[in-house]
Image (tube, rainbow, N blue to C red):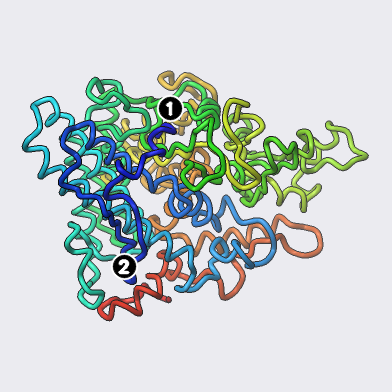
Amino acid sequence: MKSKIYYILAALVLMMSTSCKDYLLEESRTDIDKSKYMQNAAEAENVLLGVYRNMVTDELYGYHLSILFTMGTDISQVEGSTNENFRIIPTNSFSANQVEIQRTYATLYNSIYNANDFIESLEKKMVNFSDKDKQLATIYLAEAKGLRGLYYFELLRRYGHIVLITNTAMSNQAPSTFVQEDPANVYKFIEQDLKYAVENLPYAVDDTYRNNKSFRLSRGSALGLLTKVYSTWAGSPVKDVSKWEMAAKTAQILVESNKHGLLENYEQLWKNSGAGLWNPTESLIEASFYSPTATNGAADPIGRIGKWNGVRATISAERGSNAGNVKVVHTFVLDWRNYPEDLRRDISVANYQYNPTKVLWVKAASESEQTALTNDADPTKKQKEKQSYTPGKWDTEKYVPQSNKLINNDKSNVNWYVLRYADVLLLYAEALNEWKQAPTNDAYAAINMVRRRGYGLPVTATSALADLPAGLDVTGFRNAVHKERAFELAFEGDRKLDLIRWGIYYETVKETAKNLGSWWITAGAPNYVVAQPGYTTKTKHDLLPIPQREMDLAPHFDQNFGW
């Protein structure tokens, strides 16, 4: 959302202020008389913006869901060789008492409470609205239900066995009364919310109703998210394969609407996110941290994008340094180098740092740039340095203009893509292949559009260079989709969740450790702590634990496997 969305006065957030509770939810409270507010659509919209507000917290897309919880895969890992401090989660060596696990769980439930509270209040108030305000109120209800669906989806696919809270009254129950819902029923509730959003939200390009529609949910957002929900529902651990058909048909509606598309230039995505620019062509759901006047206060929409998961930098006091705490697994780079025409590799992977100017990681003081480039291309040279490559999509020196604000050494205003149209195209291709048990022409068309753009080619013209070979069977096409999702969505928070829904997370971690050991020819082994014995365990790490605090307070809860 634009900066003004996040500077909501206390009198406007009403139901959105928070206080901790000793069970399940971090429930929202207010001392303001709700009966005296939300008397029209304008007041309702101000409150609705508070339902968006938690998206920019550290517990959601400011840090945990974007960076901290996403590492430990075949493409990314945490820096260092230990599991100390913030490394404990990316190395899978945490317990059910881990504070970040509890805070994200609580913040997601808090977000759901905010949505429930808004929906209940508006449904009561809007009966007295004018016809025009009723039309707007219906759109706001659809936004709130879409957000509730998103928050529940994040809870369900990470924690697995959760309580379904469908109204605010349920939040006041005693802890002893809560029971975990069958995941299939939670999926049905999410499906219901997102279908309502699809039916009642306009496409972004058609939106003449909302005065401020930047970074707001649209029909395209809801269709794309519902496609992702069905694709996850079809995979592990629920494995309702009938949902592949629904995923394909939902994505088809979005694709055939022609209301969204791919940006012509892949790199433009990261120029936009660095500058806080909203382009709804490809951006379906985006957490906006942009605020050119932001300071370092708690009310500011600031996250860690680019500071923790960008290119390492030790530069001027004005722009601060970047830690570069996310490292690229180098066997992923070696695989990508088999496709030298793919322009996304050198945008997505940074083999350089800023110290104080841009220099290659592999460059020693006595070496020329050409020697450094030669070493970089040779997998047997400078192996230790190669383990220090970082994601390049959030290169703050390349993509964040002086007009944007880099808060300090820890925080920035770089935006985060929660869902892109390219993601939906790849899910469409995957769903068609799984549903039909063979790739269809539409499946080929969807994945090839993404690949052509990645190679810098027109997305609608066939290409012998970029297009997948014809005649792939279901397994061959599935493998191609898996690889393409790694390339297109590298470091955007999808890989770990993809590996989990494909049922191959543990196996992938072990195979990656083996591949790193085979590549590393010098003494010692590369740092890949997540694969150390006793850390990643088969099936256990497909879900986060239910926080121990909740287990202690809710006697009817069952802990997730292995915890």
Q: Position of residue 329 (x, y in %)?
A: 63, 51
Residue 200 shows up from this direction: no
**Mark 1, residues whose alpha carbon is within 10 Å: few (<14), some, or many (≥20)?**
some
Q: Position of residue 180 (x, y in %)?
A: 24, 69
Name the disc covering residue 327, or none. none
Query: Residue tagged by mark 2?
Result: 24
> For the C terminus, which image quadrant?
bottom left
Seen at 26% across and 40% down, the residue is 248
Asked where in the image residue 186 lies, by quadrant, the reply is bottom left
Residue 123 shows up from this direction: yes
Looking at the image, residue 43 sits to the left or right of residue 320; the answer is left
Looking at the image, residue 350 sits to the left or right of residue 445; the answer is right
For marks 1 and 2, the one nearer the N-term is 2
In the rendered view, would you say 158 is above or below 66?
Answer: below
Decide which of 129, 489 is in the foreground and name it: 129
Decide which of 88, 303 is in the foreground and name it: 303
Marks 1 and 2, Cα distance to the nearest angstrom?
35 Å
In the rendered view, would you say 304 is above or below 530?
Answer: above
Query: Residue tagged by mark 1?
Result: 278
> For the N terminus, which image quadrant?
top left
Q: Where is residue 95 in the image (x, y as percent from the top left)?
A: 49, 73
Tell me the mark number nearer the camera, choosing from 1 and 2: 2
Q: Label 2's element? A: loop
Give, as a three-letter code, the residue at label 2: Leu
Q: Are marks 1 and 2 in contact (CB under 8 Å)?
A: no
Residue extending furthest toward the right: 366
Seen at 15% across and 49% down, the residue is 120
Q: Where is residue 371 in the image (x, y as percent from the top left)?
A: 85, 35
**Mark 2, residues whose alpha carbon is within 10 Å: few (<14), some, or many (≥20)?**
many
